Amino acid sequence: MKLTISGYSTALFSTWYFLEELGILMDAGDGLTAALLQKSRKISHVFISHADRDHLTGLLQLNQLNAREGLPVICYPRDSKSFPAMEEFSKRFDPHIRGTQWQAVGPEEEIWVKDDVVVVPVRNEHVTTEPHIIRSLSYKVMQVKQKVKPEIAALPPEEIRQIILERGKESTTMEVRTNLVGYSGDTPVQDLARWDQSGVLIHEATFLASEGDVKLVAHKNKHSKLEEVMDMVSHIRVEQLVLGHFSSRYSAEQIDRSIKDLCEKYAINIPVFRLLPGLTVRDILSTTPVNQ
């Protein structure tokens, strides 16, 4: 599936990613409608990773401009109290947006955005809570297809038709899910296998692994360091990597040099893209990868 992904991601200030063909917005930081203009009308589902202001301050404007009956569907971590408060305020402030759906979600729930596309939330550890409390989420965007079972696929077509007549079509097919896009949100790297077999992985990399960062403890801050992300990617199967949420303390040259050095260190040959601090990038996957 072709994907057009546009976005902006600068730690502390704003983060959002728009998956155009799917009508999906990942996080809703400040400035998203000013960047997308009429394309923001295509957004049917919004998935918010957590309640930090740089991930949700564009939500009110998006909703005010584009709300209609039943849309958008705004999904948020089920135990985050900020979103019910936001919903209540927005309905008083902009009564015409009452058709918007606000949906609290938790890990492993399924939110269907199209007949063959489902989004599955994944717990992460950006916000420290008890295991049963969910205040921060990552998301997997999965394409779902029905394929003929391997043990039947080699049979002649007439035999397959006979099996369908006798046992029903469901007896001949199996569900296959493909992870189109993984979205980390803000989180330290913990589970190396979490994003295995992702078509596109969008992952935060707030801090660079350099001498100047020794005093910064990524896990204490509940963010990732670039080297942690690259190390993880070197152990799993990812087709394309998009890095964002870099701290604005770093220059473009520092970020690009660090990415190139780590690609060499970990023998990463897949396309690696990045969103530099302060810059909106349109159709990220059509830009030139940093490591090519």
Image (spheres, rainbow, N blue to C red):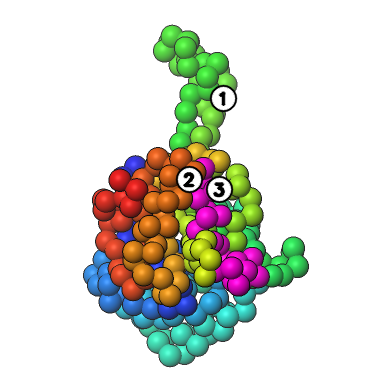
Height in image: 13 above or below 274? below
Q: Quadrant of residue 257?
A: bottom left
Q: Nearer the viewer, residue 247 or 102?
A: 247
Which span is picked out in magenta?
Answer: 213-234
Image quadrant where one finds the N terminus: top left
Quarter location, residue 68:
bottom left
Where is 227 relative to 208, above or below?
Answer: above
- Residue placed farthest to the left in the image? 38
Give whichever of discs 3 and 1 has the lower sequence position. 1
Residue occupying image coordinates x 53% and y 22%: 149
Q: Which residue is mark 1?
A: 171
Determine if the magenta segment contains residue 215. Answer: yes
Residue 232 shows which numbered tag?
A: 3
Amino acid beneath label 1:
Ser
Circles 1 and 2: CB atoms closer than 8 Å: no
Residue plotted at (43% across, 9% down): 156
